[in-house]
Image (cartoon, coloured by chain):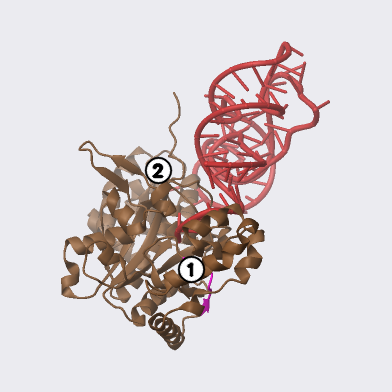
Chain colours: A brown, B red
RNA sequence: GUGACUGUAGCUCAGUUGGUUAGAGCGCUGGACUGUGACUCCGGAGGUCGCGGGUUCGAGCCCCGUCAGUCACCCCA
């Protein structure tokens, strides 16, 4: 029979890797909470039209990367390829803006039909935030600070790269200026950039083709032609970032692939990720809510690529292993196993968060200790023939290798209490686990 | 979507110009140590060589296709 494998560009997640995901998600939620952002959950699929209108009809995402299908009712649906448009849709559908500015965060999968590569998948996971209703630079700085704090909380020294791509007033002017700059050299540009010249001249700025470089370097920057309000906004963003001590660089080559961005755009980049250098990206999208049929409402947000972020942590060796914790019950023989089951149950009920594990196999004691050791258990409770005969338990500290015999009390609940009392009296592990 | 590289045991990898029973380390398992997780020593299990065709007396090695991963481009988180 032919083996069935996970679809291309997807991955299964299991321990210990899934534990790292949980840690990242927990941290992200905690920091979002600290900033006053509440979780929003939206469907994994939406009307195709939402993304066509929200992301932009001529973007690569919409043109060639969406998982679009018809359901049995003939509706055209699409697995979400990004998360801002769905959040806006939900916010509008439930009239949440009627109550004033709103802040949301989200965590979960998104889908793009791309050619997989390290740090690039067909199902990827993002954590992100969206802040609606504040037009001023404070909101831009808030979301940048949130992203910064999340990255920094994992011990990474991070700098934001920021830029402004203007608004409806000045971006068309910039576009014209770029076309005027590049058009005379059209034949000298890379093929990709020649087509970008017609479709999206801004993209030429981040071209990696060597033949484009001299022209890119001489190109006018968006900052040169920003209209007065946009220039003031960008200056204010910079001074507020300075004020709260968020390190950043201005990078005039940052543009965004999604049509809805206006004014501030930013990225956090890592050199650990090869070509997929962007771990976190976002910006302001003042026109999107109105474009999706809502009242004119400013917005700003970012998305962080969770796979990419975890890749960085792994490469940097930043993934911490916690101290030993939990109790492994080692039962030797059928009778001891039968005896151990109610004891384990009592321990689990009384342990308040401690992991209580037991191996139901016939593995010999050495093997069970080895497994408990690898699982980073702190202690082991041994029940074998001797203990069954004497009505005792052996409690062993796996960190110090010391052990003592304790009486097994009349009931399992009492025995559990005495074992847990012994456990809590253990001295904290001093050595740092590798 | 374009170009390139890789795919051998659970994991990391060897495998000579195509040649007979495909190896190592780690892990697993049994024993030396009648119930104690380091170390050492001895034994054992585990592989349709990604999959499908082809060439050949003979293919893990060569050819074609396919699937998957990786690298760059494209794009993006």
Please tell me how crowded label 2 is: few (under 14), some (14-19), or many (20+) other residues with Cα within 10 Å. Answer: many
* Left or right of A337 in this view: A312: right
The residue under the point 55% across, 74% down is: A220
- Residue A1, picture quadrant: top left
* Left or right of A325 in this view: A161: right
* Left or right of A344 in this view: B33: right
Please tell me how crowded label 1 is: few (under 14), some (14-19), or many (20+) other residues with Cα within 10 Å. Answer: few
Q: Relative to residue A43, is residue A231 depicted above or below?
A: below
Q: What element carries label 2?
A: loop
**Residue A396 visible, this orientation:** no
The residue under the point 48% across, 74% down is: A162
- The residue under label 1 is A176
- Which is more toward the observer, A157 or A417? A157
Q: Relative to residue A283, is residue A63 depicted above or below?
A: above
The residue under the point 48% across, 68% down is: A176
Quadrant where the C terminus of chain A is found in the figure: bottom right
Q: Does the magenta stretch include residue A201?
A: no
- Which is more toward the observer, A209 or A305? A209
The residue under the point 62% across, 62% down is: A185
Nearest to N terminus: mark 1 or mark 2: 1
Tag 1 and tag 2, C-beta contact below 8 Å: no
Q: Where is residue A395 in the image (x, y as percent from the top left)?
A: 40, 58
- Residue A288, picture quadrant: bottom left
Please report the bounds of the magenta region as a residue range. A248-255
Q: Where is residue A129 in the image (x, y as percent from the top left)?
A: 34, 67
Secondary structure, magenta segment, majority class: loop
- The residue under label 2 is A332
Q: Position of residue A375 (x, y in %)?
A: 45, 54
Q: Relative to residue A331, is residue B44 depicted above or below?
A: above
Q: Position of residue A277 (x, y in %)?
A: 54, 62
Q: Is mark 1 on a helix, strand or loop?
A: helix
Total labels drawn:
2
């Amino acid at each position: 029979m032919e083996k069935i494998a996970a679809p291309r560009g997807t991955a299964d997640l299991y321990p210990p890797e899934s534990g790292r995901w949980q840690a990242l998600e927990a941290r992200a939620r905690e920091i979002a909470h600290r900033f006053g952002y509440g979780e929003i959950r939206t469907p994994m699929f939406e009307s195709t039209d939402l993304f066509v209108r929200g992301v932009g009809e001529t973007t690569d995402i919409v043109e060639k990367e969406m998982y679009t299908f018809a359901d049995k009712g003939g509706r055209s649906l699409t697995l979400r390829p990004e998360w801002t448009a769905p959040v806006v849709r939900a916010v509008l559908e439930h009239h949440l803006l009627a109550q004033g500015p709103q802040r949301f965060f989200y965590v979960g999968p998104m889908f793009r039909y791309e050619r997989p590569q390290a740090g690039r998948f067909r199902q990827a996971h993002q954590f992100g935030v969206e802040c609606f209703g504040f037009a001023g630079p404070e909101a831009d700085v808030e979301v940048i600070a949130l992203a910064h704090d999340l990255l920094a909380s994992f011990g990474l020294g991070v700098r934001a790269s920021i830029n402004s791509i203007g608004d409806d007033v000045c971006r068309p002017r910039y576009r014209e200026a770029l076309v005027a700059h590049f058009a005379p050299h059209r034949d000298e540009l890379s093929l990709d950039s020649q087509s970008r010249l017609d479709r999206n001249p801004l993209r030429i700025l981040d071209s990696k083709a060597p033949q484009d470089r001299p022209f890119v370097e001489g190109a006018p920057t968006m900052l040169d032609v920003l209209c007065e309000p946009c220039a003031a906004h960008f200056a204010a963003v910079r001074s507020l970032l300075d004020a709260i001590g968020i390190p950043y660089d201005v990078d005039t080559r940052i543009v965004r692939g999604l049509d809805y961005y206006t004014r501030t755009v930013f990225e956090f980049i890592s050199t650990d990720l090869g070509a997929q250098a962007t771990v976190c990206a976002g910006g302001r999208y003042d026109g999107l809510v109105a474009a999706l049929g809502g009242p004119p409402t400013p917005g700003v947000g970012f998305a962080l690529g969770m796979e990419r972020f975890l890749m960085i942590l792994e490469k940097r060796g930043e993934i911490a292993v916690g101290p030993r914790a939990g109790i492994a019950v080692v039962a030797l023989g059928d009778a001891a196993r039968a005896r151990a089951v109610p004891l384990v149950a009592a321990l689990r009920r009384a342990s308040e968060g401690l992991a209580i594990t037991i191996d139901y196999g016939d593995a010999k004691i050495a093997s069970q200790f080895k497994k408990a050791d690898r699982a980073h258990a702190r202690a082991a409770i041994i029940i074998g023939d001797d203990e069954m005969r004497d009505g005792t338990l052996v409690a062993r500290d796996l960190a110090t290798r010391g052990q003592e015999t304790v009486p097994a009390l009349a009931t399992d609940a009492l025995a559990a209490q005495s074992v847990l009392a012994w456990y809590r009296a253990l001295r904290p592990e001093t050595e740092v686990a590798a």
